[in-house]
C-alpha cells in the first residue's frame, strides 16, 4: 500500500472515532492519615481538591473509622472537616469502617482474637513461673533466608508455574 493511500485512509477514519462513555464511578482512595492532627486534614483536603479537579466523583476514606468508639472529639472535628471538603468538591464520601486486612480495630478491643496456627505436642520447659519453648533440632527451614539461589530458583524450594 502506498503512503498517500495510507494517509488518506487514516485521515478519513479520524472523524469516525467514537469515544467510550466515561466511567460512572471515578474514585480516589484516601488512606494513611489518621486524622489526629490538623496537618492530616490539610493534606487530605488537598488530595480531595486535586481529585475533584481531575474528574473524580467519590472518595474511599480509610482513616481509622473502625475505631470510632475510641476516637477523641478532635478526631470527629477533623472528620467533619474532611466531610465538608467532600461536599464542597461534590465527592461522595464512602467510609471504610471495617478493616479486615490487619485487624487492628478488632485487636485493639481484644488482642486474643488474633488467629494463630495450631501447635500440637510442642515441648515447653517450665522454670519458676515461665514456660520456655524448646524447638526440635530436626525441624528447620532449609535456606530460610533465601541466600542460596541460582537465577530465580532458591535451594530447598520448588515453584509451580502453570
Image (cartoon, grey):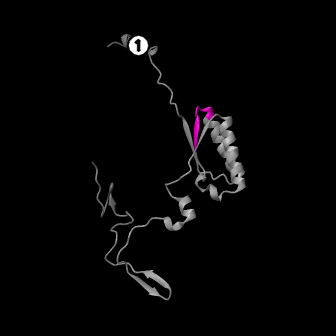
Where 28 sits versus 143, above or below? above
Q: Which residue is mark 1?
A: 7
Of all residues, the one furthest to the front in this rendering is 69
Horizontally, is 21 left or right of 6 in the view? right
Quarter of the image where one finds residue 56: top right
- Secondary structure at badge 1 equals helix
**Position in image of residue 137 (x %, y %):** 33, 78
**Position in image of residue 121 (x %, y %):** 34, 78
Horizontally, is 88 left or right of 30 in the view? right
**Position in image of residue 48 (x %, y %):** 63, 39
Residue 2 falls within the magenta-colored stretch? no
| Range of magenta residues | 52-60
Horizontally, is 82 left or right of 30 in the view? right
Where 11 sits versus 95, above or below? above
Residue 59 falls within the magenta-colored stretch? yes
Of all residues, the one furthest to the bottom in this rendering is 128
Quarter of the image where one finds residue 148: bottom left
Quarter of the image where one finds residue 29: top right
Q: Residue at x 34, y 66 (%)?
A: 143
- Label 1: few (<14), some (14–19) or many (≥20) C-alpha neighbours in 10 Å: few
Q: Residue at x 44, y 14 (%)?
A: 16
Q: Residue at x 29, y 55 (%)?
A: 159
Q: Residue at x 58, y 54 (%)?
A: 66
Where 98 sits versus 13, above or below? below
Amino acid at each position: 500500500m502506498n503512503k498517500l493511500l495510507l494517509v488518506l485512509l487514516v485521515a478519513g477514519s479520524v472523524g469516525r472515532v467514537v469515544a467510550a462513555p466515561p466511567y460512572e464511578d471515578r474514585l480516589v482512595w484516601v488512606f494513611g492519615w489518621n486524622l489526629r492532627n490538623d496537618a492530616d486534614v490539610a493534606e487530605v483536603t488537598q488530595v480531595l481538591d486535586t481529585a475533584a479537579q481531575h474528574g473524580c466523583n467519590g472518595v474511599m476514606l480509610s482513616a481509622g473509622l473502625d475505631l470510632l468508639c475510641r476516637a477523641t472529639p478532635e478526631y470527629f472535628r477533623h472528620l467533619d472537616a474532611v466531610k465538608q471538603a467532600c461536599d464542597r468538591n461534590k465527592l461522595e464520601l464512602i467510609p471504610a469502617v471495617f478493616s479486615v486486612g490487619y485487624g487492628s480495630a478488632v485487636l485493639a478491643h481484644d488482642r486474643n482474637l488474633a488467629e494463630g496456627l495450631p501447635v500440637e505436642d510442642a515441648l515447653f520447659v517450665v522454670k519458676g513461673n515461665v514456660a520456655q519453648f524448646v524447638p526440635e533440632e530436626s525441624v528447620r527451614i532449609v535456606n530460610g533466608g533465601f541466600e542460596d539461589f541460582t537465577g530465580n530458583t532458591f535451594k530447598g524450594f520448588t515453584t509451580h508455574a502453570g
